[in-house]
Image: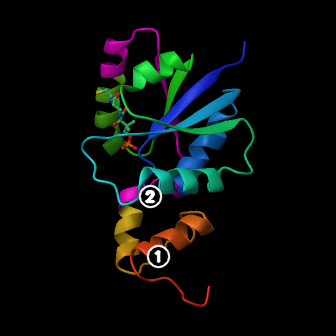
Amino acid sequence: MKKIAIYPGSFDPVTNGHLDIIERGLNIFDRIIVTIMRNPSKKTLFTVEERMEMLGNSLAEIPNVEVDVFHGLLVDYAAKRKADAILRGMRAVSDFEYEFQMALMNRKLNRDIQTVFLMTGLRWIFTSSSIIKQAAEFGGDIEDMVSPMVCRKLKEKFGFADPSA
Ligand code: PNS
């Protein structure tokens, strides 16, 4: 039986830290469904379509990965897709409380779906979509934290695009 994981998130935008988790996840799962979901406590910079496009572009070379969007409860989506697990990345202790709370709520909502946490590579321990957006907003160099396409999109959003590119 093929093992399937859902990797849910806001992906606003996808970062190299997310890609690192997906690659690590593929050592455990046969297939990973990367799903853009709504986090009611976050206002996004990019539209769902833009986030889909950036994920699709960043994951184009990685086999056994699918990109999807779902509006609703994560556990309902995981059951609908017959997933074996929800995959989440863990960086520092600061992630723990939020992730723990979410995993336990998801377990309360559906006891059959497990959450699996993977540690990001040390290289990405300090990165997040939010901190990258903040650096990009003020013209900071974020080139080695996101894919070239995401870097271009961030520069466009914040008016730092190179008109000759
Ligand atoms: O990348 P994020 O913003 O940390 O991802 C959080 C996300 C989107 C996975 C979470 O907010 C989520 O699962 N949203 C869907 C609604 C839901 O099922 N919430 C969990 C139970 S309270």
Residue at x 70% of width, y 51% of height: 60
Q: How many marks?
A: 2
Residue at x 62% of width, y 34% of height: 25
Q: Please state if 73 lies on the left or on the right of 34 as rendered.
A: left
Q: Quadrant of residue 45?
A: bottom left
Label 2 or label 1, whichever comes before in sequence order: 2
- 133 vs 160, nearest the viewer: 160
**Local crowd size for mark 2, using a 10 Å CA cut-off: few (<14), some (14–19), many (≥20):** some
Residue type at mark 2: give it: Thr
Residue type at mark 1: give it: Glu
Q: Please state if 87 lies on the left or on the right of 60 as rendered.
A: left
- 122 vs 98, nearest the viewer: 98
Residue 111 lies in the magenta stretch: yes
Res 122 seen here: no
How is the rendered protein coloured?
Answer: rainbow
Q: Quadrant of ligand 1?
A: top left
Q: Position of residue 109 (x, y in %)?
A: 33, 14
Give the residue at mark 2. 127
- 99 vs 36, nearest the viewer: 36
Numbered disc 1: secondary structure:
helix
Give the residue at mark 1. 156
Residues at discs 2 and 1 in contact (Cβ within 8 Å): no
- 97 vs 3, nearest the viewer: 3
Q: What residue range appears in magenta?
A: 104-130
Q: Quadrant of residue 47?
A: bottom left
Residue 96 lies in the magenta stretch: no
